[in-house]
Amino acid sequence: MEDDLGKEHTLYTDNNYSSPNLCNFPLKNKTGSCRTVRVTQKIMPTFQKKKMMRDDIEKQMNGCLYFVHVRKGQLVDSGKKNSERNLVIFKPYTIVDYIKNMRPVDKLDMMVESVECMTKSLKWYKNC
């Protein structure tokens, strides 16, 4: 990651790596970050409990963290179709962008998990 710092790239991470410290480090080095967070995390601000209408966006800032709660924002074609009715599936732009950029991270996580599983099974086999 150090090679990409300062080049104004965007770092996409999942909710396992979404602490405030991990947000500050890329920003100090001119690198953006985009991540999902769990609602139960300590750093999460409390959003209003009111029912959001279509195209509502609620935003809050907390230091360098910028929280966005979107309810059916700008809808775009997700590139997928409903299998039963053959209708195009529309999703909010923020979701489509995040999924597109998170796909390589998820694939890498799956590859790492399969290697860990193999090493555990090999160790188990050797112990017997």
Image (spheres, rainbow, N blue to C red):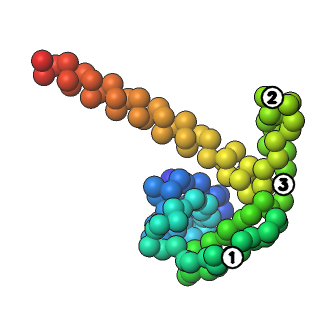
Q: Residue furthest left?
A: 128
User: Which quadrant holds residue 52?
Assistant: bottom right
Residue 45 seen in the figure = yes
C-alpha separation, residue under disc 1 versus residue under disc 2: 34 Å
C-alpha separation, residue under disc 2 versus residue under disc 3: 21 Å
Image-based side of 105 in relation to 87, left or right:
left
Image-based side of 5 in relation to 128, left or right:
right
In the rendered view, tell whether residue 82 sits above or below residue 67.
above
In the rendered view, tell whether residue 62 sits above or below residue 98.
below
Q: Residue at x 59, y 40 (%)?
A: 104
Residue 80 horizontal/vertical position (percent): 79, 36
Q: Residues within 10 Å of mark 3 (few under 14, many from 20)?
A: some
Quadrant placement of the C terminus: top left
Residue 97 horizontal/vertical position (percent): 73, 51
Give the number of the mark in front: 1 or 3.
1
Residue type beneath disc 2:
Glu
> Which is nearer the eye, 16 or 70?
70
In the rendered view, tell whether residue 12 sits above or below residue 6.
above
Of label 1 and label 3, which has the lower sequence position? Answer: 1
> Which is nearer the eye, 65 or 26?
65
> Which is nearer the eye, 126 or 90?
90
Image-based side of 126 in relation to 89, left or right:
left
- Residue bearing the label numbered 3: 75
Residue type beneath disc 3:
Leu
Residue type beneath disc 1:
Lys
